[in-house]
Image (cartoon, rainbow, N blue to C red):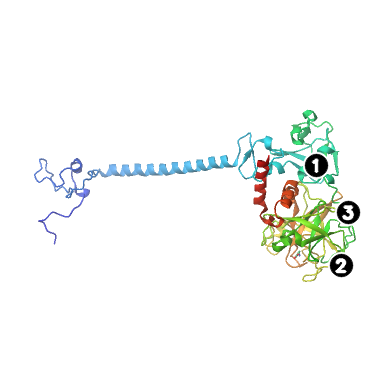
Amino acid sequence: MTSTLGPPPPYYENRGFQPEPLYAARQAAGAAPYPQLFSTNPPSVPSYMPRVATHQPSPPAARPPRRTCAASLRKTIIIILSILIVICCAIAAFFIWYFVENTCLSSLVGCGSSGVCMSPSQWCDGVSDCPNGEDETRCVRLFGPNFILEVYSPVSNSWYPVCHDDWNDDYGKIACRDMGYNVDTYFYSHGVPPEASFKSYMKLNTSAGNIDLYKKLYNSGSCATGNVVSLRCIECGLSSKGVSTMNRIVGGSGAVLGQWPWQVSLHVQGTHVCGGSIITHSWIVTAAHCVEGRLSDPHSWRVYAGILNQDEMLFRSGYKVQLIISHPDYDTDSKDNDVALMKLETPLSFTETVKPVCLPNPGMMFQPNQQCWISGWGAEYQGGKTSNNLNYVAVPLIERSRCNAVFIYNGMILPTMICAGDLAGGVDSCQGDSGGPLVTLHHSVWWLVGDTSWGTGCATPNKPGVYGNMTVFTDWIYRNMQVKYSELFSYILRPHILKCSSTLKKLINKCDLHDK
Ligand code: 4AZ
């Protein structure tokens, strides 16, 4: 039972029982904590006021139900509006951040995806300013099967053909050197009628004095001769022998000397391990999976060129390898970016049987079903031993979407890969052909379409050969052939630490800057 004698237990308020609510609310803070027993203005019913001293301000008075409802509605609207304002501010802040980080002010040019901005005058000035050196590696390119020289304009973010007016071999050699070629391999610069009607050209300002080639070039809507520069930095893609399309690799034919003059055999401890393709006097393209792990040491390798039989190689010394550069984004499991470069200690001499193949130019489209050829000393059947003779076979290209079909490679063919072969089986590359060439003949020139990478078994129906897609790798190859990188790597750094080359290259770019 609750006692009526002692003070009741402390409580604060029960507004539901206040017929004159404002009365209690008018009590000053800290006013008599207990109800006045003899009030001059007594409530008509008991007033439930606090019975303990709290030193708290009096609680707000209760409002009539309609006002409470309006207030709570207003409160809800204010809360919702506040939330909306906060969300809008967050979205606006994100967009501001995105544009500040990813775009440059109109007068500046962005360095790829790094977010760093450069002045156009820093582009192609011989000094690497961008974190990944984009300002010096995207200056010139050869476009399409006619090797049309194009110069990059950072201002309009476009490539322009170079007008042949006032052009000479000295300029051609500079452009070739900037792409990574040695001036010794320079072949020619010709004026050719443009294939497309160009609206704008790069023209030489010959009165600009003895300054850098790129500073002499300016954008012009006219070209007096109407011809553009076709530039060949190396005499590549010429074979002295035709191909017989009669086939005997798996299902192929025995090659004759000089037929695939770019084909090399890569040996470790006197044994053929992989194939490769000559692209310059000093550089060989092969597969990254050939030079993985302990095989990344260049001293392990010997390179044999211009020889058809493995037996014969045993009596020769081969070429020593100075440097191996594996693609930094090569993935062992998926075989993504399966490409590597080998630099020879002494350059190859080109002969009728030792010649480079051409790297594909941007703008070259290889069609599905286009006839290509593979060559190598790989096994002649699944599980067989490597062949003593160089073999070759014709393999048509297979569209990526088709090769990715569920019953073929079920989505494993990435953009860095290209499929070739016969879905019926019978012709294919096999163990030991890896790294070797997949080539095609176009405009009387042999082009390196791919490097032999992987496949399920050999010549199995619906399991064609998979090759590294060379068109995707050419920028990387040119960048790595550029002297500043390869010389530094060869002489300053131990070559077999090149697996982490992308970070090191960034460091070297910074060294370039600080050394100036
Ligand atoms: C290899 O192991 C290899 N059938 C190369 C090509 C193919 C399979 C294996 C494609 O060198």
Q: CA distance from mark 1 to mark 3?
A: 22 Å
Residue 335 appears left or right of 68? right
Q: CA distance from mark 3 to mark 2?
A: 24 Å
Give yes or no for contact between labels 3 and 2 (Cβ–Cβ under 8 Å). Answer: no
Q: Amino acid at mark 1?
A: Ile
Indicate the quadrant of ligand 1 in the picture: bottom right
Sooner in the amino-acid sequence: mark 2 or mark 1: 1
**Residue 427 spot, x, y in % from top left:** 81, 65
Which one is closest to the eye, mark 2 or mark 1?
2
Q: Residue at x 69, y 65 (%)?
A: 407
Quarter of the view holding residue 342: bottom right
Circle 1 crowding by C-alpha within 10 Å: few under 14, some 14–19, many from 20: many
* Residue 472 visible in this rendered orientation of the protein: no
Q: Which mark is residue 239?
A: 3
Label 1: which secondary element: strand
Q: Nearer the viewer, residue 104 or 395?
A: 104
> In which image quadrant can residue 105 be found?
top right
* Residue type at tag 2: Asp
On the image, numbered disc 1 is attached to which residue?
Answer: 148
Amino acid type at mark 3: Ser
Q: Is residue 178 above or below residue 340?
A: above
- Location of the N terminus by quadrant is bottom left
Q: Which mark is residue 514?
A: none
Which marked residue is nearer to the observer: mark 3 or mark 2?
2
Name the side, left or right, on which 211 lies relative to 499: right
* Mark 2 surroundings: few (<14), some (14-19) or many (≥20) residues within 10 A: few
Establish if 135 lies above or below 263: above
Query: Which residue is tagged 2?
Result: 311
In percent of width and height, residue 206 lies at: 80, 30
Give the image location of residue 120, x and y in percent. Answer: 67, 35
- Location of the C terminus by quadrant is top right
SS of the residue at dot 3? loop
